[in-house]
Amino acid sequence: METAPHAAPLPQAFTDGVFPAGCPSRTLLDHITSKWGVLILIALSEGDQRWSDLRRRAEGISEKMLAQTLKTLERDGLVSRNAQPVIPPRVDYSLTARGYELSALLVPLVAWAFDNAEDIINGVPQGK
Amino acid sequence: METAPHAAPLPQAFTDGVFPAGCPSRTLLDHITSKWGVLILIALSEGDQRWSDLRRRAEGISEKMLAQTLKTLERDGLVSRNAQPVIPPRVDYSLTARGYELSALLVPLVAWAFDNAEDIINGVPQGK
DNA sequence: TAAGGTACTGACCTCAGGGTAAGTAACTGT
DNA sequence: ACAGTTACTTACCCTGAGGTCAGTACCTTA
């Protein structure tokens, strides 16, 4: 029942243990841990997706937020947009190399949340 | 320059590729990816901390948000609170087993964000 | 000729996440 | 007697995340 012994190395970063307020990582962290950002990145980790696919998979997202989230992730170089000049329009989104790198870290986190959510939200103590 | 081939298995969860709107994992994800939640969990991953330590380390957090975040994480069974009946008060916070499990997934993510933030926010394309 | 499909944009409004500041309890040291 | 310490709570306010809805462009099919 002991908690954290002392493991889990925070690599070289934050050696003083302080997370500075003005640090750019704060901004990036806000983008990638945003409500919809996580879901979009996870969805794309399974392969390219069209706009309409993403809308369907991130259930509950509005068109406005989908557009906004995708723009942010694109600006951050995590997602790339490929528009085909056809009618009706067809736009495919995919992860960049950098985005794929990130999704590899994000996927286990979301999987863990999925596995533990029910117990935690319903207040099951610790055992199962 | 190819992006995601198809790897990174989303374990058993979300086999249909849809993230349902009412899913409890949405709530949990909101807690653990919240602006301050992440920082608190990371800070505690290095060992027990007092209230005042956490305030200092999560630079910029207000007392109100620290209290609120800690309460949420405690309710979720990720953080445990140990108050000693001394004057002036002394309260230590630590990760539970569950919280430690989570922090092991969170730490690499934050480390990645820290390493890549500067390039990404300043718009360095991809190479370095 | 009118409806439908796709990928958006923009205007408008609401609500909650989060900041600021002051107050509190209870003891200790000067 | 009074300031100092620590861990909070409470009240008030405000910005911005995010929802809703309407509109658009352009071609296709009924």
Image (tube, coloured by chain):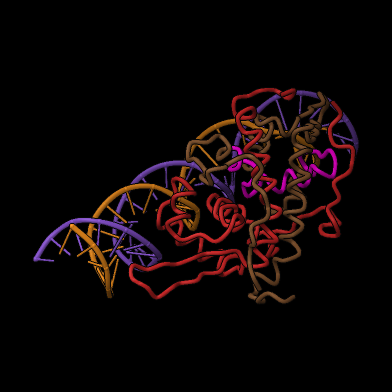
Chain colours: A red, B brown, C purple, D orange
Q: Is residue B63 visible?
A: no
Whether residue A57 is visible, yes or no, is yes
Q: Does C3 sit above or below residue A111? A: below
Does the magenta portion include A83?
no
Left or right: residue B124 compared with residue A44? right
**Horizontal and vertical percent for residue A44?**
57, 57
Q: Is residue B89 above or below residue D27?
A: above
Q: Quadrant of residue B104?
A: top right
At a point 62% along the width and 46% down the height, the residue shown is B34
User: Residue C8 lies in what quarter of the image?
Assistant: bottom left
* Magenta extent: B28-53
Secondary structure character of the magenta stretch overall: helix
Tag count in the figure? Answer: 0
Magenta span contains residue B36:
yes
> What is the quadrant of the C terminus of chain B in the image?
bottom right
> Which residue is depicted at the point 86% across and 29% down?
A2
In depth, the one of B17 and B128 nearer the eye is B17
Q: Position of residue B77 (x, y in %)?
A: 70, 30
x 54%, y 49%: residue: A35
What residue sits 80% from the left and 44% below the top? B53
- From what the image shows, is residue A115 above or below residue A21? above
Residue B83 in the image: x percent, y percent?
A: 79, 27
Residue A5 percent location from the top left of the image: 89, 37
Q: Quadrant of residue A7?
A: top right
Q: Quadrant of the N terminus of chain B?
A: bottom right
In the image, A35 versus B85, the foreground residue is A35
Residue A78 or residue B98, whichever sits in front: A78
